[in-house]
Image (cartoon, rainbow, N blue to C red):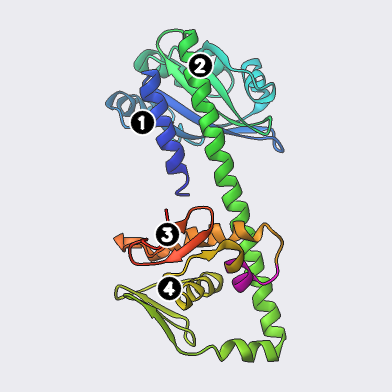
Amino acid sequence: MQDWAVYQSILNKAKGAMKTRFVGLSRFDAETQRVRVVALAGMESRAFIRAYNALSKVIPKFDVVGIEFPVGINQESIASYVEGKTVQAPIPDLARGIVHPIVIDVGVRLLGMRHGMVCPVSIKQKVVGALVFYMAKPFNDQQRRIGEAFARQAALTWENITVTLELTQQIKALEKKRELIIAQDPVLHQALTKSDGVLSYESISIDQQTHEVVFDGARIDLTNLEFELLACFLRYPGRPLAREELARQVWGNQPGSASNFVDVTVMHLRRKLEDEGRRRLIHAVRGHGYVLHRDGAAEGT
């Protein structure tokens, strides 16, 4: 999932700010009561590679990213993931019961991972994971504040990604519902399929009969909703279109949250159109909506 690249960026920045070798990210599933390590910054270092190679000879299938354990494995884990407290402790205490003692010994001896700090990542007062920092010396108050600040940043990123995924799923459900309604209504199906002709602007064109999209000579595969949204822009090039207007034309009469569907669909549409370095044609109009324009000059922003 490409969104994890965002988390990796946060981990790298946290590692630099904390001046530590390693920072990990874990996820906590409240339903299963299990914790899983999903990312680790610092694996590219020579020391880590040497330690990992040495460890793989003793525990062949061991993988740092993918470690999973029940949240009640030790008191430190319960304090972090259940009680939502920042926990600082020697690594042998934090990792007790989670990994093999050999792994702990390698981490302490070869990587200097003697002390750890677990900073819970919470969304709406519920712990969803944690940032875990590793250092040779105990953490001071300033480092604790830095760690907790990065945990809050991770929480915001986590929440934004979750909202985007939920909206994407709702959009897909709406698209399937729309296709079903059209398929079951012969009159509506005939009216929609009569929207023939080619719409074009600059180097982008769409065929409303075949649903073929060509931009800068490249064919672009779009979903039906993405195609309808692009068609709407192409009917009014250079004209700023409000989110509500776009939602009405593409989704019909939907509740107010339909404007959120517009933002997410525009995001997916832009990614496909701008893939392989193609220029941006759909621009945001601050406080209003979007506009199709070659350089965004019609934005008013």
Of pointers 3 and 2, the one earlier in the residue sequence? 2
* Residue 251 belongs to the span the image colors magenta: yes
Q: What residue type is labelled 3?
A: Glu
Of pointers 4 and 1, the one earlier in the residue sequence? 1
Of pointers 4 and 2, the one earlier in the residue sequence? 2
Determine which of the numbered discs, if any, sits on residue 145 in the image.
Answer: 2
Q: Is mark 4 on a helix, strand or loop?
A: loop
Q: Which amino acid does label 4 sit on?
A: Pro
Which residue is identified by label 4?
237
Q: Do the residues labelled 4 and 3 touch (CB within 8 Å)?
A: no
Residue drawn where x is 56% and y is 44% of the image: 160
Query: Does residue 292 sit above or below 168 in this rendering?
Result: below
Determine which of the numbered discs, if any, sits on residue 43 in the image.
Answer: 1
Residue drawn where x is 57% and y is 62% of the image: 243
Which residue is identified by label 3?
299
Using the rendered image of the protein, determine whether residue 217 is visible from the camera's viewpoint: yes
- Number of residues whose C-alpha sits closer than 10 Å to that of mark 3, classed few (under 14), some (14–19) or many (20 or more): many
Residue drawn where x is 48% and y is 49% of the image: 1
Q: What residue type is labelled 2?
A: Arg
- Number of residues whose C-alpha sits closer than 10 Å to that of mark 4, classed few (under 14), some (14–19) or many (20 or more): some
